[in-house]
């Protein structure tokens, strides 16, 4: 009887273990559908990475072109401003006073005005060259526009970098 009392729980335990082990299925190998799904996911990831790389390359190229444009416009603006400074430096108060004194003296109306070209140049110096001033304003506007375009391209590149940053961190984990 003692033997039967010990055997009953043992048999019951074996039965219970046998029923639990039959409900757990052994791990199966990857099916063809699983492999195809994984290949498709890899292709999508590769396509996205290629697109992102291409966008980044295009943005970098655009940034370089903008930097060249900005450098060229800045150089032209600097040259124009130097020409304006040269004109301002050419002001000669003594020459202005001499022409005023010459105009005060009576002269023969039939005699040619020998100082006409000097007066025109002096007036250009006194008033500044309007062509140079307009060019300076135009180049300043162009420079501001190109710099704004550079900032926009750079912002796009930074956004692309931020977008790609978290994806890299996730894959590293």
Image (spheres, rainbow, N blue to C red):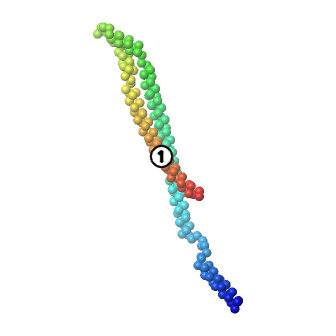
Residue with the most extreme right position: 3
Residue 134, horizontal then vertical, whole percent: 38, 30
Which of 111/1 is in front? 1
Where, quadrant-wise, is the N terminus in this rendering?
A: bottom right
Question: In screen coordinates, is 123 left or right of 28?
Answer: left
- State the residue lying farthest toward the left: 109
> How many badges with numbers are in the image?
1
Between residues 13 and 126, which one lies in front from this camera angle?
13
Position of residue 77 relative to residue 155, above or below, is: above
Residue visible at 41% across and 13% down? 94
Report whether residue 125 is seen. Answer: yes
Residue visible at 67% across and 84% down in the picture? 10
Locate residue 151, reporting x and y percent. 46, 42
- Helix, strand or loop at mark 1: helix
Residue at 32% across / 10% down in the picture? 104
Q: Residue furthest front?
A: 2
Residue 52 visible somewhere in the drawing:
no
Q: Up-down: is 136 above or below 96?
A: below
Residue 79, percent from left and from top: 46, 28
Judge from the rendering whether residue 153 lies leftward or rightward of residue 173; answer left or right: left
Instruction: In the rendered view, tell whether residue 132 sits above or below residue 106.
Output: below
Q: Is the residue marked by circle 1 packed among few (<14), some (14-19), or many (20+) residues within 10 Å?
A: few
The quadrant of the picture occupied by the C terminus is: bottom right
Image location (x, y in percent) of residue 87? 42, 22
Would you identify the image quadrant in which residue 34 lies?
Answer: bottom right
Q: Mark 1 — residue? A: 155
Residue at x 59%, y 76% (from the top left corner): 25
Q: On screen, 33 above or below 125?
A: below
């Amino acid at each position: 009887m003692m033997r039967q009392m010990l055997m009953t729980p043992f048999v019951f335990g074996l039965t219970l273990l046998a029923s639990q082990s039959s409900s757990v299925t052994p791990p199966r190998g990857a099916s063809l559908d699983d492999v195809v799904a994984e290949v498709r996911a890899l292709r999508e990831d590769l396509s996205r990475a290629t697109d992102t790389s291409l966008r980044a390359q295009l943005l970098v190229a655009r940034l370089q072109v903008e930097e060249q444009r900005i450098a060229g416009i800045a150089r032209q603006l600097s040259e124009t401003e130097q020409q304006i400074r040269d004109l301002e430096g050419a002001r000669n108060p003594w020459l202005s006073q001499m022409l005023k004194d010459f105009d005060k003296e009576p002269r023969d109306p039939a005699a040619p005005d020998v100082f006409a070209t000097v007066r025109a140049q002096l007036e250009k110096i006194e008033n500044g060259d309007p062509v140079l001033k307009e060019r300076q304003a135009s180049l300043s506007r162009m420079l501001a526009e190109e710099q704004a375009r550079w900032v926009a391209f750079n912002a796009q590149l930074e956004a692309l970098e931020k977008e790609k940053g978290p994806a890299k961190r996730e894959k590293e984990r």
